[in-house]
Image (cartoon, grey):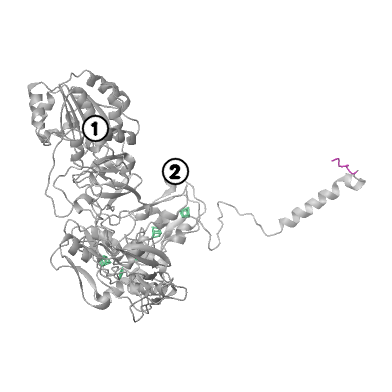
Amino acid sequence: MIVNRKKLNFLERLYVPAVIGGFKITIRHFFKKKVTMQYPEEKWVVPEGYRGAPYLVKDQQGRTKCVSCQLCEFVCPPKAIQITPPGPGGLPEAGNVEKGPREFEINMLRCIFCGLCQEVCPEEAIFLMKDYSLNGKSREELIHNKEKLLAMGGVHNDKIQKWKTKADEARQQGL
Amino acid sequence: MSTNAKIETPPTPAPVEKIKVKVDGREVEVPKTMPDGVTGKPVPTTMIQACHAIKVEVPHYCYHPRLPVAGNCRMCLVEFGTPAMGPDRKPILNPDGTAKILKSPRPAIACATPISPGMEIYTNTPNVRFMREGILEFLLINHPLDCPICDQAGECKLQEYSVDHGQTSSRFAEIKVHKPKRVDLGPRIILDDERCILCTRCIRFTRDVVGDDALGIVNRGSYNTITAYPGKPFDNNYSLNTVDLCPVGALTSKDFRFQMRVWFLKETKSLCTSCGTGCNVVVGSREDRMFRYKPRENDSVNATWMCDHGRLNYRWIHNPERLVQVTVRNGAAATVSDWKSAMPQLAARLKSAAPGTVAVIGSARQTTEELFLLAKLARHFQAVTDSVPRTGPADHLLLNADRNPNSTGAVFTGLAATPMGSNLGKIAEGIRSGRIKTLIVFGEDVTRHGIGADLLARLDLLVASDILPNATTKLAHFVLPGCAHVEKRGTFVNVKGHVQKFMKAIEPKGDARAEVEFLKELLPTVTGWTAPRSLEGLFNQMAGEIPALQGVTWAALGDTGVRVQI
Ligand code: SF4
Ligand code: SF4
Ligand code: SF4
Ligand code: SF4
Ligand code: FES
């Protein structure tokens, strides 16, 4: 297709009106509210429900909420989670919960932030939190172990506290 | 399967009168009586057996085909009808000529109600579904719902039936009755009374199958509690079968407890190697680590049970000491080698051995195929051969006094002397006199069986294949790392002549290889005889050459094996 170039008229050939028009726009934006964020000095606060990195949480009594049921390990599509169950002795510090993970690793190089682990967890022990920028100097650094996951996860204010209720009920019934 | 006379067919039971019944509208013909699961005496056929005969599943907890019927869980309730009889004791007919069926006003438990001619069983009516829902609601009233920490989760009948037949939510708002948890029942078993659904399978098993009346129920109503006899641990050699029988997570194995969730376990059909019975098992493994044995049904060997001794005897497979390198020793210095360079060296050394100067000792723990190849090697050298007998106390159920899994195979292949072990002294004598200069040992530490280190030091060539290091492998000129049975395929012949195969569950560690593989590599150079390439072919070739195995093929072995005459 041939596009015929329109001949510019005199005013247009002067360019000055166009330059002035450009300045107008620049000046208007100059006085507008700034939208650019000075990352990384400034960080974006993600909205509620954002699916960031998965972390483990403790309950109000300081018990690691995860009971190592390994459902998240099973459901995780890229197989990012690897859990070492406690073995025959269980976890003595877990009290009437009996179980907890001996080791819990999430390979953040594999995780796709799908949130299925949080969805499947029957104990509300793993949550996708607000961290979206994960980087490290080595691959190992990005395999989060139990200690790291718990430190990042913090305490979850559990309203049901099913294991504590169970223990209290059993005590009341003389067991 | 071939019709060779040597293969024993199970004795055909005397013909029993057949009865025609209808299950969900489908007609099925079943024998009037069937052998009782425990005693084998003929007892009237029940509705659940008729349903199972045409593969209609009736959910059940307390019923088990190998236990006496208890009829206490009510999960198997079904509706049924019988032909209506007139006053003349003749069936009343419908206008279209079919028998008029009188539907029973009340349901019946399928596990304990005998069938009668013309009976109609309905397993999927709205009423039946409603009853199942009700039973499950009752079972869950005091159930702790420990699934996240319960070892049974994933193979729990309460979970399965709840999903299939239960309600989605509970109407029970009261506080649950709590019962003892983490009860130490015995050396191998932990009991969680809250999870127990009181089906009494465990009680019936240990009382009626094992003959050890160790368990019982105490207290009443919702406080019903399973317990062992006070002051007496539940420790018979079959106690772990109750863990398999328990439909829920009340009885759990201390050995398997909190090791791995069952849905990760790959299941491989295998055999127990701890005695000559050869119980059929399923190996549970994940990522090349073995976690447990579970018995597998085989009516001609172990029914559905296995003993605790065999079940827990697997730790050696993951022993960190395992031999994982080919080692060649010249004089005092042992050097790590590999298959590629060690095999030609070994073949050359063996080739130069003169007939009559060689002895071969093959363990009766090796597979029949391995022993067959060893026997070929031995025949080439006109070697003295033997296996090592291994015995222990037997018991009244499964555990055999012969603790080798393949003694019969060693006899069949001609490797074992008669009686087994009688040639060991001759071999020792031969080495002492200098007549025997080469000794090939597979799977035994001969220093513990009369051929001491001083004698081994006199040999020109000592070849040892084993799984774990021992005094013999320490002195051997060639150490060939072999495989545990879960790392290879093969067959064993049990004490009664049952030929059974086992499959590979996990990969061997390091350089370890299945013995069959490297024997097959060695044989053509040393003897000029080439073995069939596949294990199936090797088995079939062997069956053709061994009279006792005539007519048996690998394919005919199936999952449950073939009985031959011994
Ligand atoms: S968010 Fe998804 S990918 Fe990441 S660990 Fe959880 S389940 Fe796995
Ligand atoms: S699903 Fe929850 S309780 Fe289970 S292992 Fe994962 S984090 Fe732990
Ligand atoms: S017995 Fe079954 S339903 Fe009960 S806690 Fe264990 S897995 Fe869950
Ligand atoms: S412990 Fe298990 S097998 Fe025994 S009665 Fe309870 S549920 Fe049944
Ligand atoms: S299976 Fe019939 S009552 Fe339990």
Instruction: Report the magenta stretch's main SS.
Output: loop
Q: State which quadrant residue B321 falls in.
A: top left
Residue B22 at x, y percent in the picture: 39, 67
Q: Is residue A3 above or below residue B187?
A: above
Residue stretch rendered in magenta on the structure = A1-6
User: Which corner quadrant holds the C terminus of chain B?
Assistant: top left
Q: Chain of mark 2?
A: A
Residue located farthest toward the front when viewing the structure as drawn: B88
Residue behind mark 1: B372
| Amino acid bearing label 2 | Arg
Q: Position of residue B528 (x, y in %)?
A: 28, 21
In the image: residue B51, left or right of residue B370 = right
Image mark 1: chain: B
Q: In the image, residue A138 lies at what x, y percent?
A: 44, 42
SS at mark 1 in the image: helix
- In the rendered image, which residue does mark 2 sit on? A139
